[in-house]
Amino acid sequence: MSTNSNEEKVLVIDDEPFAREFFRKLLEKTVAHIHTVDSGVEGMQALQQASYSLVILDIRLPDANGIDILKQIREMNPLMPVIMITAYGTVEDAVRAMRLGAFDFLMKPFEETGKVLITIKNAIYQGQLEKENLSLRQQIKTEGLFPQIIGRSAGMKRVFEFIKKASEVESNVLIQGESGTGKELVARAIHSNSGRKKYGFLTVNCGALPESLLESTLFGYERGAFTGATKTTKGYFEEADGGTLFLDEIGEASSSLQIRLLRALQEREVVRVGGTKSYPMDVRMIMATNKDLKEEVVKRRFRKDLFYRINVIKIDLPLLKDRRDDIALLTDHFVENYCSRMNKGKKTFDPKALQVLMNHDWPGNVRELQNVIERIVALHGADVITEIDIQEHLTILRSDEECDFMDLSYEKAKEIFERKYLENLLRKFSRNFEDASHFAQVHPATLYRKLKQHALSK
Ligand SMILES: Nc1ncnc2c1ncn2[C@@H]1O[C@H](COP(=O)(O)OP(=O)(O)OP(=O)(O)O)[C@@H](O)[C@H]1O
Ligand SMILES: [Mg+2]
């Protein structure tokens, strides 16, 4: 980590003299300037008067609640990294602070000073990266660079800027967004705009394979490593050599896989399952999740050290309902696409029909919109699609409503049944993929595809 600590300025807001002294001592040799204050008001004043690289903020202050001060800091300067200090802190306090954008939290009495120092350095480094991103954002014109990704909303413009930046460097990327928001599409765009575009783009879904299969898929295995391992086989880390490896649903990785991944990312080499020799890897890593990984870290379900490794460039994909401006554009795009794929004449949506699409909440995001348009194009003969045609398709998605299958067409009844069946399956097995596929006697890959089709996948 190349943090030029000597130029950094750290503000400590804590009323406890011991804590202020602790940070002063700790940072004395690394950070030239440390400024300490003992109240929220003084802290806010200090922030208005000088610029800092990091704020270390006590959650309990004599004149204010640290969480409120955190909010004020975020409003004043959203890029400022803030580390919270909590003494009697509950996990809830910490989770709230993390949700509000705190970089991390430290528990009093402080853990080993070494660890505290690393947290501080990481926070400063993260702040620098974000500042760099911002200045790049101001320089870059991204329009037209990624024709396959549709969107003109402010949220998507931000995404384009991050894709551009991520394509130019080799850093690990974490893409966060709910189901169907375009995570894989963005990962592919980064790869195909990067220097690695001539090499492979491989994807592995950490939520879709049983743990042991996942490890051997990623790392490969030596002959005899387990029953059925008849010949030594390379894993995706080796297969993707020179290219990009996309690890989807990284939040589902088991703790043993997390350790293996951390080692691979740190050492830039992999050891095959059942082997001892390590092989160098030259792979660019992009990871995606629909979970809030930061929160998973707080809840100790995801390793903090791995999180920091992969969270170098973070791209947050907005929900479709938070960028309704893009719905009309996406609709045109999908209609054109499916009409030409299905050899149908050009179809249009009348204004009221379009309004219905724009008002819908799209829990399955772009994938759900895409599926609805595909169905409409496939099933409607008329050139103009009306509000009524659309309503019919949107009700399919509200499958909690009771309906009489016998009154529906075969296709529609089948679709509603399938969705209900899958939803029930997910509930019954608490989203445990392996058990669900075993119970339903459906191949995991088929089940996975079906869940995707219905925008139900995790
Ligand atoms: N901005 C976009 N422009 C055009 N197509 C999009 C856009 N976003 C998503 N799509 C399309 O929607 C579908 C879902 O996208 P993708 O598979 O990338 O989502 P995801 O976030 O990976 O979903 P999941 O979490 O379910 O895996 C794909 O067919 C993709 O091409
Ligand atoms: Mg995906």
Image (cartoon, rainbow, N blue to C red):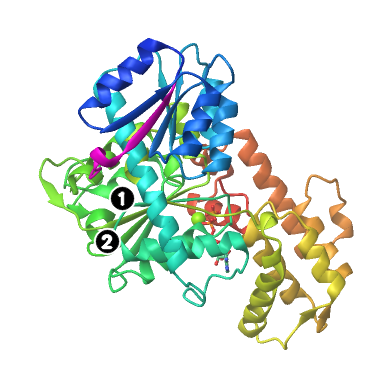
Residue at 51% in and 60% down: 159
Q: Position of residue 427 (x, y in %)?
A: 64, 36
- Quadrant of the picture in which ligand 1 is shown: bottom right
Q: Residue furthest left?
A: 277
User: Which residue corresponds to the image point at 26% horizontal and 22% vertical from the top-left?
Assistant: 26
Q: Which region of the structure is painted magenta?
A: 1-13
Q: Compared to 39, does 179 lie above or below?
A: below
Residue 296 screen position, x and y as percent: 47, 33
Q: Residues within 10 Å of mark 1 (few under 14, many from 20)?
A: some
The reply, left or right, for residue 72 in relation to residue 2 is: right
Separation of marks 2 and 1 at Cα, in angstroms: 12 Å
Question: Residue at image x 84%, y 63%?
Answer: 392
Where does the C terminus fall, quadrant-wise? top right
**In which quadrant will I find the N terminus?**
top left
Report which residue position mark 1 lands on.
Answer: 217
Of residues 50 and 311, the one nearer the viewer is 50
Q: Which residue is mark 2?
A: 240
Q: Visible in this render: residue 285?
A: yes
Is 6 inside the magenta-drawn segment?
A: yes
Coordinates of residue 210 in the picture (x, y in percent):
40, 41
Up-down: is 252 above or below 356? above
Label 2 or label 1, whichever comes before in sequence order: 1
Residue kind at label 2, given as amino acid type? Ala
